[in-house]
Image (tube, rainbow, N blue to C red):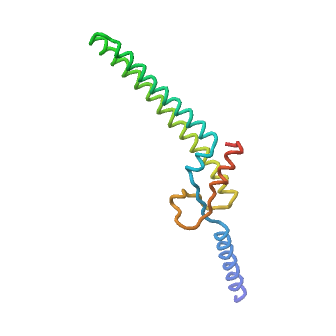
């Protein structure tokens, strides 16, 4: 009976020792999302594309303003305003869809690369650098390197 108790106790100690060794090996990483985004070529290109569409929208408004000023009757101005308002709303909605789509693509690609780094570094989690006050492993440069390798 004593041998069974000793064996059970030994097994229990081994299990707990295994848990503590695993917990010590893992940890928490953190990432500076803004830095990653600023150094990710896909994100930089997406920002340029969105900015270009924004400039097109501004130019559209300037052109419409010039056209409006050239109209001579109140009826023509009213019809022009109504038509322009509809067109502008459609253009603004398309712009916002593009912007949101690009932001989502960037986020998903950065998240996928971050998950790969988390697995490679054997971390339990990767948090935003704004959350970490002391400690943790900065994986920002590892994520940037992974993104620049072109897999994402």
| Residue 92 horizontal/vertical position (percent) | 43, 29
Q: So how many labels did they put on this image? A: 0
Figure quadrant of residue 73: top left
Q: Position of residue 100 (x, y in %)?
A: 50, 37
Residue drawn at x 44%, y 22% as measured from the top left = 60
Where on the picture, by quarter, is residue 86? top left
Quarter of the image that includes the N terminus? bottom right
In the image, residue 136 sits, relative to residue 9, either above or below, namely: above
Which of these two is toward me, 45 or 106? 45
Percent of width and height locating residue 95:
48, 30
Closer to us: 98 or 72: 72
Q: Between 17 and 6, which is closer to the camera in this rendering?
A: 17
Residue at the (64%, 61%) spot, across then down = 123
Classify the position of the C terminus by image quarter: top right
Rendered image quadrant of residue 16: bottom right
The residue at the point 65 percent across, 51 percent down is 143
Does residue 89 lie above or below 33 as drawn?
Answer: above
Residue occupying the point 69% across, 49% down: 146
Determine the residue located farthest toward the bottom in the rendered image. 2
Q: Compared with residue 134, is residue 37 higher up or lower down, i.e. above or below?
A: above
Left or right: 70 as drawn, with respect to 40: left
Q: In this view, does 25 lie to the left or right of 82?
A: right
């Amino acid at each position: 009976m004593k041998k069974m108790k000793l064996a059970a106790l030994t097994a229990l100690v081994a299990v707990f020792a295994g848990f503590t060794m695993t917990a010590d090996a893992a940890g928490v990483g953190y990432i500076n999302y803004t830095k990653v985004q600023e150094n990710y070529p896909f994100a930089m290109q997406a920002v340029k594309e969105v900015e270009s569409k924004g400039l097109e929208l501004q130019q559209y408004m300037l052109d419409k303003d010039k056209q409006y000023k050239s109209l001579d009757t109140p009826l023509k101005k009213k019809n022009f305003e109504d038509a322009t308002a509809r067109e502008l709303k459609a253009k603004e909605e398309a712009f916002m869809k593009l912007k949101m789509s690009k932001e989502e693509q960037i986020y998903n690609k950065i998240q996928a690369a971050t998950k790969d780094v988390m697995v490679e570094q054997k971390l339990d989690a990767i948090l935003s650098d704004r959350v970490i006050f002391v400690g943790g492993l900065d994986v920002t440069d590892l994520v940037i390197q992974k993104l620049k390798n072109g897999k994402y």
